[in-house]
Image (cartoon, rainbow, N blue to C red):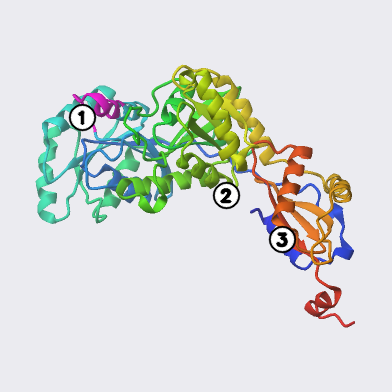
Amino acid sequence: MTEQDFTLEEEFETYDPDDFDPAAYEELTEDGEAEPAVLPIVAVVGRPNVGKSTLVNRIIGRREAVVEDVPGVTRDRVSYKANWNGREFTVVDTGGWLPDSRGLAAAIAEQAKLAVELADVVLFVVDANVGATDIDEAVVEILRRAKKPVVLAANKADDTRTELEATALWSLGVGEPMPVSALHGRSSGDLLDRVLESLPEPAPRERLGEAVGGPRRVALMGRPNVGKSSLLNKLAKQNRVVVDSVAGTTRDPIDELIDLGGKTWRFIDTAGIRKRHRENQGADFYAILRTQSALERSEVAVVLVDASEPLAEQDLRIVNTIVEAGRALVLAYNKWDLVDEERRFYLDREIERQLVGARWAPRVNISAKTGRHMEKLVPAIETALDSWGHRVPTGKLNQFFTDLVSSHPHPIRGGKQPRVLFATQAGTRPPRFVLFTSGFLEPGYRRFIERRIREEFGFEGSPVTVTMKIREKKKDRDKRFGRKR
């Protein structure tokens, strides 16, 4: 809620309907955010289970990267903003690096290589208790070819004895080993000082081709294995995210700036929501928290649904989560290349029966694998965002309600018929309407009002909330404001 919306709500609390001035509620504006500076990048690499994600959490000062006491929890390269001694930079967490790996492990190693190519400084993490291994030496050879500044972190140096043993890591030939305990924070400040010494000067601010506020933020959501990461890779035109037939390969939100339709968008790939929140454990539990956080900082959510399979409970729960969060919504039915005529027949009926509360969401039928109908995705997103920020002038809105109430009045209950005295749009993103009424409006009538608002003013792709403020009896209002009769 914006500061202006909050002020408006306060006015509602003390408002006298007899003194209503529609002009006072016209044309509220919302300020955008300033565009961020381009920050230097620090890539954190190393073999599996040396504590890279724990070190990332220590650097950024909060538990953001998923951490669990098993190797291979981090599978993609994931970026976070960090600040040390007033200097801002981006930290990129990567999966465990096994240079000679195959299958999924090879894809994870490839992500680590890409992170090194994009980085300004490489933070190479080694287990001080184990010492230099053959894998560590193989990683060093790759780092040398990259010709990037390298800071060697000897992690898990929890005591003085281990710190002394860490000096043996000079043998790797990438400079002085910096003993550190990511778990306990021991010497982490010294390590960050060394990182800052290696960082280039901050780049000047860049325009991203967008209006004030920067790129619009789009969250890719859906249950596991519906093709979210494949879609992001197709849009980015590169293998940005690990894709595997094993469900759940994405566990952290992945941000990517992508140029589409002449604009720059910030797409956020999220972990698949597979179970009820209370059933998630370990890394999956924290991954779901990251997904919820990604939704909160997004403006519109694209929910991918596997069109080749019946709609699942998880699909409906994800849609409801987005509606409750007040975000714009686009439904993308993926794997359309696998859908035959019979499946289309049943899918239409499933949508009609199960997605009653989201019939207003734009629908696109796509194939992330083949690229089918990908050009329809951006127009649908733009439509949803336009609706999400749309404001109806108060005068036009009240003329609409005058005609609506006269043609479809509220049913009489208990000998009384509540009326809508006037209405105003209290806010946008999402659109919120407040009705000042003479009595309580039944839920069914409020749903009818919402449906008619959509028919009249559009709002395709955006949730709409309709609330009411019941006019008090004059004697009660006078008593509340301390007026004498």
| Disc with the residue nearer the chain's start (1 vs 3) | 3
| Disc with the residue nearer the chain's start (2 vs 1) | 1
Relative placement, left or right, of 378 versus 119 is: right
* Closer mark to the observer between disc 2 and disc 1: 2
* Residue picked out by circle 3: 9
| Disc with the residue nearer the chain's start (3 vs 2) | 3
Q: Name which quarter of the figure residue 314 lies in.
A: top left
Label drawn at residue 324: 2
Crowding at label 2, few (<14), some or many (≥20) Cα neighbours within 10 Å?
A: few
Q: CA distance from mark 1 to mark 3?
A: 57 Å
The residue furthest bottom is 484
Crowding at label 3, few (<14), some or many (≥20) Cα neighbours within 10 Å?
A: some
Q: Quadrant of the N terminus?
A: bottom right
Label drawn at residue 98: 1
- Residue 295, given in percent of the width and then of the height, sits at 51, 44
Name which residue lies at 74% across and 37% down: 458
Q: Quadrant of the C terminus?
A: bottom right
Q: Which residues are magenta?
A: 97-110
Element carrying mark 2: helix
- Residue 167, given in percent of the width and then of the height, sits at 12, 43
